[in-house]
Image (cartoon, grey):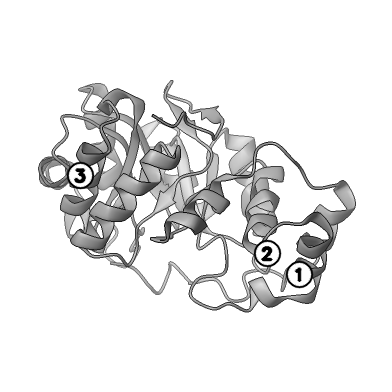
Amino acid sequence: MTQPLAPTVALKNGAQMPRLGLGTWPLDDAEAEQAVATAIGSGYRLIDTAFNYGNETGVGRGMKASGVPRDELFVTTKLNKEDHGVDEAQRAFERSAGKLDVDTIDLLLIHWPNPQQDRYVDAYRGLVKLLEDGRVKAIGLSNFKPAHVDRVIAETGVVPDVNQIELDPTKTRAEVRTYLAEQGIVCESWSPLGGRSDDLRHDATITRIAEARGKTPAQIVLRWHMELGLVTVPKSADPQRQRENLALFDWSLTADEVAAITALDQGGDVGVTDSEEFGH
């Protein structure tokens, strides 16, 4: 069996989270089952899904098919706005755990704050209860702005383990990253390669560094995330690309290369999905 390749980061509540994993959106159940089994066989141990992706059953099947013991895997899922509430979060856990066919979930996130319905603090209270009951090993947020995070901490007294946010070299989110670091919250990037657009992988700065290093543009961007101390979960169903995406840990970028990539930032929250307006 291939050994895990990604180093881990210690979360506030004691769990060890791999720093690079497999994202699964927008794979369906059948695609997710195959992609997850292949990825785990290549050394991945972190798998990221969500109720909203509609593929938790496939992710669970892929984990089983891999043959790797459950306690060596770290699975993340996320609950929707209809599950914002203490009791609702318990039901969301039961539903997702059932689909994944697991007894515990390693990391459960609130997918979006949905501030218009103003129930994300109660949803987080529900996550805290799951943590206290030992049904989840870590809890966190996704797409939460610092003001949302401040309120969660102020009203519950429990600091989240993780905030998963949209982040790539054109959206470096420097202020948010600094804020999360000050709180001791791990920052996790989604859409680390710029989403469905290939623009980032064709960027002149990225391709120049890739050619000089003998790496793929995706590897350069993902290594940049590692240099910034982030966790990230690139999606790929292609076995070769999965292996390439994981081959990041026996080399590094220079400070100048990191600075050149960071300089691609468009400034502020340009291009970032606004969680005050969007959510599910």
- Amino acid type assigned to the residue bearing label 2 in the image: Pro
The residue drawn where x is 43% and y is 46% is 151
Mark 1 / mark 3, whichever is N-terminal? 3
Residue 34: percent from the left, percent from the top?
A: 27, 54
**How far apart are the alpha carbons under marks 2 and 3?**
31 Å
Q: Give the structural element (helix, strand or loop) at label 1.
A: helix
Residue 220: percent from the left, percent from the top?
A: 70, 57
- Image height of 186 relative to 219, above or below: above
Q: Give the structural element (helix, strand or loop) at label 2.
A: helix
- Mark 3 Cα-neighbour bin, 10 Å: few <14, some 14–19, many ≥20: many
Can see residue 199? yes
Mark 1 / mark 2, whichever is N-terminal? 1
Whether residues under marks 1 and 2 lie with C-beta atoms below 8 angstroms apart, the answer is yes
Q: Give the structural element (helix, strand or loop) at label 3.
A: helix
**How far apart are the alpha carbons under marks 1 and 3?**
36 Å
Can see residue 144? no
- Mark 1 Cα-neighbour bin, 10 Å: few <14, some 14–19, many ≥20: some
- Amino acid type assigned to the residue bearing label 1 in the image: Thr
Mark 2 / mark 3, whichever is N-terminal? 3
Mark 1, residue position: 207
The residue drawn where x is 65% and y is 40% is 229
- Image height of 24 relative to 201, above or below: above
Residue 217's tag is 2
Q: Quadrant of residue 138?
A: top left
